[in-house]
Amino acid sequence: MSKRSRKDNETSETADGESPKDGLPLSTGDVHAKIGFTGASSFRGHLVLKRLAELPHVKEIHVFDIKAPLVHAAKVVFHRVDLTRDGSDELVASLLIKNDIKFLVHGALFSGPGRNPGNRREVETIGTFHVLNALAEAKVERCVVLGDTFVYGAHSQNPNFITESHSLKPLGPDFVRARVDVEKQLVEFAKDYPACEVCVLRFAPILGPNSTNVRARYFLVGIIPKVLGYDPLLQFIHEDDAVLAAQLAVFSKARGAFNIVGKGVLPLSTGIHLSGRFPVPVATPVCKTVFSLGFMLRLWDLPSSMVPFFQYLCVADGSRAEKLLHFKPRYSSRQALKALIEAARLRSVGFSVPSSALGEEHPLQADEGFVRVI
């Protein structure tokens, strides 16, 4: 197989190039009857896979992962593949060609920092490199990438609302630098293989009744750390809106990067107040030490590299997604957080929760009542 070569550049661009066909939705007949999928075992990947499996015009979904997905459907076909291993690109390419798959969702990306940064970098940078090699060999026509807005980083110079044309800085925490490297690969691939439509969805932190990511756990621990003297604005997206955006991207001709965000923002102090938890302000000179200590003792899942996100803005503008993907969020950032918090409170007293918003602005319908778990 002829493989692309990696270029270890130190700068990055955003994948926001447009074509005359950008934003034109495809029909929902047999256009993407067979879909490839990576990262289906993650929370975000699980949500998107579940929605795609429910669509009648999707014939097969071929999952490439080291873990079998939790979505059990006849149309979901699992292939055990470790994207970090040499030769995985050849294996994935052969499976794409054999099953005549012309579309792939790349979701093998982490939604926040983790406790094994070395493994994270391998999965994201090396895994993406292998996936793009496979796409090039199999001549896949469209690739939708499930990314994150944290790729912009949290900096004091950030504008109030960051657009997709904002340059990505290969600085800051390891998890941001790794993602910038991924986006650089995507930009280079899109230039070298214009026949493949590359669409990158940069999601704000996804919250909702079922969320399990780092941001969700932050608001559910008993003691919440914050940096003294700072109260940055936060932005979230409800999990139902996130899935809707991914579905629209699948059946679109739009290329480039898109910020997928909820309506409005809210201050960190408001979010902590809504959670009902006890905030612990930490002085700036010792905040990284305190965050590291709490992370090491497993009091929270926030390493010291997250400190800038508790000081500076990282709020994205979603107007491009509205214009070209026709995506308009139904819920606000506040509602997404409320859905997470209220669902956690109900579960703590033995109730199961429907997977819909629990925000005060959209009350549940009478037939969506809670069911007691015995």
Image (cartoon, rainbow, N blue to C red):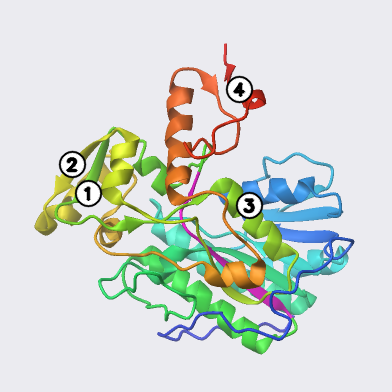
In the image as oriented, which residue stretches furthest toward the front?
A: 361
Q: Which residues are magenta?
A: 196-207
**Label 2 vs label 3: CA separation?**
34 Å
Residue placed under numbered mark 2 in the picture:
280
**Label 1 vs label 4: CA separation?**
36 Å
Helix, strand or loop at mark 2: strand
**Mark 4 and 2 residues: CB-CB less than 8 Å, in contact?**
no
197 in the magenta segment: yes
Q: Position of residue 284 (x, y in %)?
A: 13, 57
* Amino acid type indicated by mark 4: Gly
Name the residue nearer the viewer: 20 or 361.
Answer: 361
**Which of the 4 image quarters holds residue 326?**
bottom right
**Mark 2 and 3 residues: CB-CB less than 8 Å, in contact?**
no
Residue placed under numbered mark 1 in the picture:
226
Q: Mark 2 or mark 4, which is nearer the start of the sequence?
A: 2
Residue density around tag 2, few if under 14, some if 14–19, many if 20 or more, within 10 Å: few
Q: Mark 3 or mark 2, which is nearer the start of the sequence?
A: 3
Residue density around tag 1, few if under 14, some if 14–19, many if 20 or more, within 10 Å: many
Q: Position of residue 126 (x, y in %)?
A: 54, 69
**Residue 369, label in figure:** 4
Residue placed under numbered mark 3 in the picture:
243
Quadrant containing the N terminus is: bottom right
Q: Mark 3 or mark 4, which is nearer the start of the sequence?
A: 3
* Amino acid type indicated by mark 1: Lys
In the image as oriented, which residue stretches furthest toward the right?
A: 30
